[in-house]
Amino acid sequence: MPKFAANISLLFKELPFLDRFAAAADHGFTGVEALFPYDDAVTQMTRRLTMNGLQMVLINCPPPNWAGGERGFAAVPGLTERFRHDFKRAVRFAEALGAQHMHVMAGKASGLVARTTFVENLRWASAEAPRMSLTIEPLNGTDMPGYFLNDFNQAAEILDEVKAKNVNLQFDMYHAQMLTGDGMAVWEAHGHRAVHVQIASAPGRRAPEKGEVDFPAFFAALDDSGYKGWVSAEYMPEGDTRKTLGWLDAMKGS
């Protein structure tokens, strides 16, 4: 059975952010991830991690402001200086939290210059933080219109061009299904590159139960492939998160 983490930026939102760590642990998660945890004190978050026996699995990089900021700048021509400044800050947060991975967000851009900018920034980031596992993630255009990295084949080509051992694929089944209509085929083609997996139903981005994806089959495919990383629940609960965790209870009972 995969090891499951909770994205506490989306799950347990009925609770204050710092209380979500305990809620995740109480419901059987052993890891958590947070999209942009830059507004809370690192000392408070590390204390919650330690108290609840949790691993911080992943944070996003940059920006520091989820509510009003752009979703990254790594592929945006002309913003290299800003990306590199914010990257260094994000690394400090990630290291203090003991985060296993940091997702480098490309931002809104298109074209050859954007691709070159993204590759150069990823190479720089790889050398700047050689001990940090960095990920890139294709996002669908319905949720993130204009986002540069919007295709798994494109991601594979960029990873091959960057050629850095600490830069790898973040595979989100929700985005894979939304982008292609066949997320399982995308996993078969690109899963060997993945160091982190995220799940949500598609469409709707709800709990991994209903929708177009056969999640029991996907979890079995993860096991069969030898994937050893985290599988993070990154969905938007309808109401109380606790009432949406039947899929996790079913996995524990299987």
Image (spheres, rainbow, N blue to C red):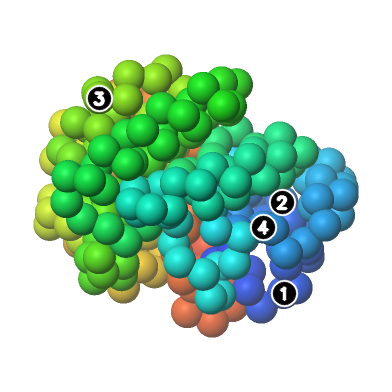
Could one spot residue 195 in this view of the protein?
no
Residue beneath disc 4: 37
Residue 139 percent location from the top left of the image = 30, 56
Does residue 39 appear left or right of residue 118 in this picture? right
What mark, if any, has residue 25 been given in the picture? 2
What mark, if any, has residue 15 been given in the picture? 1
Of 185 and 123, nearer the camera is 123
Tell me the residue at 59%/67% (across/down): 65
Q: Secondary structure at mark 3?
A: helix
Mark-to-mark CA distance, 1 and 2: 14 Å
- Camera-near label (1 vs 2) is 1
Tell me the residue at 81%/45% (across/down): 46
Q: Secondary structure at mark 1?
A: loop
Residue beneath disc 3: 161
Amino acid type, label 2: Ala
Residue 105 percent location from the top left of the image = 42, 50
